[in-house]
Image (cartoon, rainbow, N blue to C red):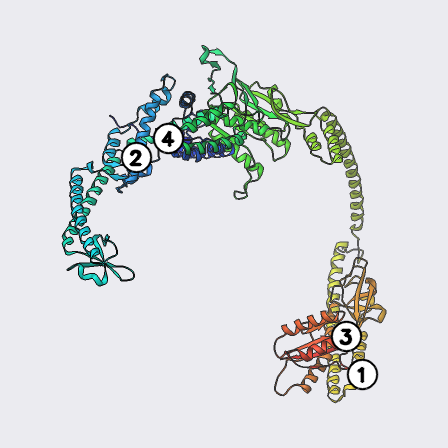
């Protein structure tokens, strides 16, 4: 017999998606690369569509009804085959119809299917040269027997013509009866052992082995009996140690087995296992015969393995056909469960071929169809029953439990979900579905998509009557949010990108489903783009179904008979959708009714209703008129303003030219002097101004030098007196020096009016930490300790006094004076501390100069005792070694001061500290180790 052509199930069998040719005026003749790219895009879009329509979930339901592990795996992986053409899909439907009839005749799918195992891996191992085991060979034999029995049972049914589609699947198969019988002659699958009749050599070896074993056993039993009678063992013992037969004897009675070989001893050492000298040759013979038997068995297994390897093609082909039959019966069981009916593929020309070519006028006529996935709850209980009955059938071998479960399918399913009618006439290429949110638009569209896929895969539809629909080569959907952050796609761009890809691969036999077309962008542009897309699709697909909230898309039917409208019914009494499709109608979104039904704010709904009234189409013309009049008034107002501005501009130019009118200067009556314009005079003024500013700058620099020299003289005198002054004279010395410095600064300070040009008093805003002049205190210098507030006041500190002043009561220090001011008094204090540090420094440890800065100062004023302790401890911990820390605790009640001194006294990092002095009241200096 000629070897049949091998086939295998491929995921989704997607090669059929390119079966329809493209129009030459739309698509140029493709190159090989373009064809591959187009196929890849088509494959990708179809795979995504299957996920969108939840086809894997339908396949998962079907997997529960498969009888073989191969059928279960194929359904679980959504590898249910689709028809590559209308005729192939019709063939799959015929197989399902034949399986339905077979189940009606025998009560369930043939129990022989349950005995068929997936032996593809076993066959693979045989081809690769791996030696098959007895159990694997028996699995192949059981599968061949069950496949043959299945074919015979289908063949034996009364009306074989009704089951011809199933018989045709298995008719071309080779059931390998000879191979099955060969395995049966060689192996006893019940006992899982190779038979003596497997080969003549094996039979002889086993006969000799049996006879030798009888001799050896008789010899050892006799020897063991003698040992027992001599008291050498409690009871006769014949056993095997190290693959050799021997007897047991107590260690002290070893002499009872003369010239015997000790093979082993008990764990206590009290018993020896000895091989008598008379048994040595017989044991050797046993070993040789056992090795020969094992070698012969391996030879037999190797022979059977090679036979299976030779039959690889026939076995794989048979398994594929078994899966095809199994899936046909699974589809039949699924159809009986949901009271499904067999769909009919409508013709392209609109004629019913079954009724003599009569005009039927309707391309899609599906009455009362339910969404298959919404029936999952019932299927789950059925799946559990099937699983338990399948296990019972495998144990009982009669399949009666399975029959009982399948008879329960005739009870039918409930009326949930709500059945819908889908009726689309010939010539209609685009259907626009409108209606409320949560009204079932998307679910209805998905139901149509699933019905198309199920009919292509040979499945019955959960509908009434006899549904009719076209055969679609491609089912492409754009449903859901296509937003992708990974690909930088917004919701709108994701939709448009997918629709663009769909338009590239569609054909005249394609079904396109688009949810909320044109959404996610400006409504006017969305309507325009959606209209253009639909106009493009109507000439290039079999059918396109779209959902929308754009009322303008429903108006396309009035201009083109290829468009059709549909609406989702909404009950105004209950304010709830009925989930029924009204064909030929236009639906309202009912957004306000739905919002009201779920308890939305009534005031918001009323305002929204007002806007709806204003935006109704009948009021569009009135709104346009009002808008036109308002635009005319705005234009007139702008023209009047433009005229006024032109008049003012003309007057300004007249004044300008009047000012620029040349002035004549005659030196003598006979000599004409050049005309000097105001512009030349202005340029001359600029030159003079720059010269004056340069002169003033030089004067200021000279004055600054004088001030610096005077300040240096004061500082030098201060240093000289400081060396001889006592501690009680320090304050007086500092105050005198400060007075001399203040008089020098005041003598060289510019008048108030001079500073106006540099800093505007009205616009000046001091900053935190900045030094300013206090007008009320004869321009004493204070520091801003708080950012200015919104009330136009600022908090400043002068000495130990803090006061809040208005902005106009202070003024900025000119930049030329800041360096001198900020460096005078602090230098006095720094010198004092340096001198004191020199006088009091430790002879052994050298500390850094005790110059107070913001970095080495911790201010505890205004804190509670516990908070002050914590901050002081943190400051000590963060200071570097051999440094100083200025602890500002203030005077106050003395609580913070006492706590600070107590902590400094006990802290391990504080080498010593100096209490406050007349130089700096309220501050203690700590020396860090």
Q: Does the CB distance between marks 2 and 1 fall below 8 Å?
A: no
Q: Find the distance from the CA under tag 3 to the CA under tag 1.
A: 30 Å
SS at circle 2: helix
Q: Give how far apart the Cα atoms at labels 3 and 4 are.
A: 99 Å
Q: CA distance from mark 4 to mark 2?
A: 19 Å
Instruction: Indicate left or right for 783 with 441 as reference.
Output: right
Residue 82 in view in this figure: no
Nearest to N terminus: mark 3 or mark 1: 1
Task: Give the mark nearer the N terminus: 2 vs 1.
Answer: 2
Label 1: state its secondary structure.
helix
Check disc 4 and report the residue beneath it. 397
Q: Which residue does the numbered mark 3 point to in the structure image?
A: 895
Secondary structure under the numbered disc 4 in the rendered image:
loop
Horizontal and vertical percent position of residue 845: 61, 84
Q: Residue 905 placed where, x, y %?
A: 69, 80
Q: Is residue 327 above or below residue 781?
A: above
Q: Earlier in the sequence, mark 1 or mark 4?
A: 4
**Can I make out residue 475 in this image?**
yes
Q: Which residue is mark 1?
A: 732
């Amino acid at each position: 017999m000629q070897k049949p052509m091998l086939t295998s199930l491929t995921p989704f069998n997607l090669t059929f998606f390119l079966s329809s040719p493209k129009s030459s005026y739309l698509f140029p003749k493709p190159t090989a690369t373009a064809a591959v790219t187009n196929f890849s895009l088509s494959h990708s879009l179809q795979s995504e569509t299957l996920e969108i329509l939840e086809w894997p979930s339908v396949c998962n339901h079907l997997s529960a009804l498969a009888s073989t592990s191969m059928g279960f795996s194929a359904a679980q992986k959504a590898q249910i085959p689709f028809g590559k053409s209308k005729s192939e899909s019709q063939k799959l439907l015929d197989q399902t119809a034949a399986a339905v009839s077979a189940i009606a005749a025998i009560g369930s799918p043939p129990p022989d299917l349950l005995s068929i195992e997936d032996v593809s891996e076993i066959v693979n191992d045989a081809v690769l040269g791996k030696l098959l085991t007895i159990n694997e060979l028996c699995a192949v034999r059981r599968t061949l027997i069950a496949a043959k029995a299945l074919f015979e049972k289908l063949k034996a049914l009364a009306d074989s013509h009704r089951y011809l589609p199933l018989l045709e699947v298995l008719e071309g198969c080779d059931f390998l009866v000879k191979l099955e019988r060969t395995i049966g002659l060689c192996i006893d699958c019940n006992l899982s052992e190779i038979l003596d009749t497997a080969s003549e050599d094996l039979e002889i070896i086993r006969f000799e082995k049996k006879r030798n074993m009888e001799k050896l056993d008789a010899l050892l039993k006799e020897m063991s009996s003698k040992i027992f009678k001599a008291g050498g063992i409690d009871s006769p013992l014949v056993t095997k140690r190290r693959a050799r037969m021997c007897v047991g004897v107590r260690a002290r009675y070893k002499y009872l087995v003369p010239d015997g070989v000790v093979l082993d001893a008990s764990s206590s050492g009290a018993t020896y296992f000895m091989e008598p000298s008379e048994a040595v040759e017989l044991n050797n013979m046993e070993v040789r015969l056992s090795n020969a038997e094992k070698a012969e068995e391996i030879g037999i297994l190797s022979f059977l393995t090679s036979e299976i390897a030779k039959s690889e093609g026939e076995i794989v082909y048979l398994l594929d056909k078994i899966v095809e039959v199994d899936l046909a019966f699974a589809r039949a069981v699924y159809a009986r469960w949901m009271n499904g009916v067999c769909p009919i593929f409508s013709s392209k020309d609109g004629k019913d071929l079954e009724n003599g070519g009569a005009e039927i006028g309707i391309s899609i006529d599906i009455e009362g169809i339910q969404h298959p996935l919404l029936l999952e709850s019932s299927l789950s209980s059925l799946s559990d029953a099937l699983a338990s009955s399948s296990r019972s059938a495998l144990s009982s071998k009669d399949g009666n439990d399975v029959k009982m479960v399948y008879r329960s399918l005739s009870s039918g399913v409930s009326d949930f979900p709500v059945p819908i009618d889908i009726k689309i006439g010939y010539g209609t290429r685009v259907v626009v579905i409108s209606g409320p949110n949560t009204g079932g638009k998307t679910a209805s569209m998905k139901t149509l998509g699933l019905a198309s896929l199920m009919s292509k895969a040979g499945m019955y539809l959960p509908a009434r009557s006899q549904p009719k629909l076209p055969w679609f080569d491609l089912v492409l959907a754009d449903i859901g949010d296509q937003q992708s952050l990974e690909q930088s796609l917004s919701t709108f761009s994701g939709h448009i990108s997918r629709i663009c890809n769909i338009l590239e691969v569609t054909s005249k036999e394609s079904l396109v489903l688009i949810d909320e077309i044109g959404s996610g962008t400006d409504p006017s542009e969305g309507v325009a783009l959606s209209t253009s897309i639909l106009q493009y699709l109507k000439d290039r697909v079999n059918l396109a179904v779209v959902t929308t909230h754009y009322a303008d898309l429903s108006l396309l039917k009035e201009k083109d008979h290829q468009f059709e409208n549909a609406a989702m019914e909404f009950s105004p009494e209950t304010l709830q959708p009925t989930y029924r499709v009204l064909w030929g109608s236009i639906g309202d979104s009912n957004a306000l009714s739905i919002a009201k039904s779920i308890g939305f704010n009534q005031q918001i709904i009323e305002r929204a209703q007002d806007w709806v009234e204003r935006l109704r189409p009948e009021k569009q013309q009135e709104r346009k008129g009002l808008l036109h009049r308002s635009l005319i008034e705005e234009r007139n107002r702008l023209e009047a303003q433009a005229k006024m501005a032109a008049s003012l501009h003309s007057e300004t130019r007249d004044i300008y030219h009047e000012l620029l009118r040349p002035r004549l200067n005659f030196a003598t009556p006979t000599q004409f002097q050049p005309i000097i314009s105001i512009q030349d005079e202005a340029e001359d003024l600029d030159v003079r101004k720059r010269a004056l500013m340069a002169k003033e700058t030089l004067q200021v620099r000279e004055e600054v030098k004088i001030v610096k020299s005077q300040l240096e003289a004061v500082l030098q005198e201060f240093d000289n007196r400081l060396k001889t002054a006592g501690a009680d004279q320090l304050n007086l010395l500092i105050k005198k020096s400060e007075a001399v410095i203040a008089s020098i600064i005041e003598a060289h300070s510019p008048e108030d009016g001079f500073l106006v040009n540099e800093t505007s008093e009205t616009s000046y805003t001091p900053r935190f930490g900045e030094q300013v002049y206090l007008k009320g205190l004869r321009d004493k210098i204070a520091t801003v300790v708080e950012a200015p507030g919104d009330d136009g006041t600022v908090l400043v500190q002068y000495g130990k006094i803090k006061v809040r002043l208005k902005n106009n009561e202070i003024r900025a220090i000119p930049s030329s004076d800041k360096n001198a001011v900020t460096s005078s008094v602090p230098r006095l204090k720094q010198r004092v501390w340096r001198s004191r540090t020199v006088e009091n420094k430790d002879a052994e440890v050298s500390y850094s100069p005790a110059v107070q800065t913001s970095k080495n100062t911790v201010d505890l004023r205004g804190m509670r005792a516990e908070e002050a302790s914590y901050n002081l401890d943190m400051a000590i911990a963060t200071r570097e070694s051999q440094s100083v820390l200025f602890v500002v605790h203030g005077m106050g009640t003395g609580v913070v001061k006492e706590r600070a001194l107590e902590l400094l006294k006990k802290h391990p990092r504080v080498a010593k500290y100096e209490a406050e002095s007349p130089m700096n009241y309220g501050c203690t200096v700590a020396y860090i180790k």
